[in-house]
Amino acid sequence: MRQELMALMAAAPPPVRRALGELMGSIKAGLEAAGQTPKFIDARARVYDWRNLLPMLTDIRAKLDRPIAARLRRRGKAKTELVRLEEQFALLRRAHEQMSLMFQISYALVNVGGEFQTSEEVLEQSAEVLIELLEADLFVCRLRDEYGEWVNVAANTQHGTSTPILVRAMEESIPGHPVMQAVASKQWSYVLSNNLMSSERGGESYDCVAYQEGYRSRLAFILRGHDTQPFGLIMLYSRAEAFFGGYDHQFLSDCSRIVSLTVGSRLEVGRDALSKASGGMAHVGNNALSVIKNCLELVKEDMEAGIRAGAAPLLRQFRTSFDLAREIELIGCALGGAERLRGAIANLLDAVDHPRIMHYIRGEEVLDLDPRSPQDEEG
């Protein structure tokens, strides 16, 4: 058999001879590895020349390759499935990390500040939580004033270094500014900006101050109430390129809603408490002050009338024992005090929307209800 095969191979052209030799070597190695021997369908079939030998060897090699190919296909499918599982695991791990971060942010925002504070202080405290947990480098807080402009009320860096001098007030009508456009649209809850050059240079900032100071990306949370009206802005800056793009859309949307909810709730609770307190004080205090003021005014009028009619003997005797002018002056001071208290009650009503905090004794902070304006005090 061996001699016949050698003779058939010798008769084949050189390229075919090399192919036959490689096929036979491959078949021998495959049979030894599989522990098999070739099986012919028709044992009487004979090979007469190399033209019959080549397809026969090819058929044997193909049969040996079938289980190998099947194993490779199974391995390929398993590898594809493994890749898919790894991708799903990576997504789940990322979702878990962001969910854990969301819980940290929520817990910190709920627990920050245990006393009544102004809108500026509440916004700043929330920004301090976000700059730490989101690993930003700078925060800027803005509130809308009575003229509709968004005023810079607080700014600080992660490590307390100097902050850039950003524009104090911004109008919603600024062309090309993505944050102001998002505020006006009443839909977006956050805005990502990765080009902080000025709008004149194709960027997404009002000016180049932040860019010149080395900041390259910005994440702006637009705080909205239940009526979707914006009431505050917390803008985080990073020196890294596209830094906030690592957070997915759902995470940032949820984060913005949580900040809006916690900040809005703190402001509403304080506003509601002030509203009830000021309403009660206005009801009781104004009534009492009206009685006091009316009585004092009647006494003052009577005394002034008595002074003008000072010829009466009884009044002359009364004036010798009392200084009526001084008494009238004291009554005037009492009337002034009553009027000042009325002004304080009016300021308490105004503090519902615009509270002012002042330092009191022993480091305590109280509402500033003094009706005298700072200009009056300076004068």
Image (tube, grey):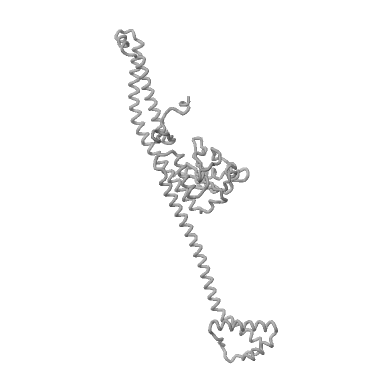
Q: Nearer the viewer, residue 62 or 17?
A: 17
Rendered location of residue 333, percent (x, y): 37, 21
Q: Quadrant of the N terminus?
A: bottom right
Q: Nearer the viewer, residue 87 or 179?
A: 87
Image coordinates of residue 49 in percent, x first then y, are: 66, 88
For the point 59% across and 84% down, which residue is it? 28
Q: How many marks?
A: 0
Looking at the image, residue 207 sits to the left or right of residue 117; the answer is: right
Residue with the most extreme right position = 13
The residue sitting at 46% across, 48% down in the picture is 257
Residue 270 lies, with reference to residue 195, above or below; the image says above
Residue in the picture at 52% in, 69% down: 79
Q: Position of residue 122 (x, y in %)?
A: 44, 41
Q: In the drawing, does residue 251 fall left or right of residue 177?
A: left
- The location of residue 101, given as percent across then percent down, is 46, 53
Depicted 215 relative to depicted 3: above or below: above
> Is residue 94 placed above or below 264 in the rendered structure?
below
- Left or right of 288, for residue 96: right
Q: Quadrant of residue 20?
A: bottom right
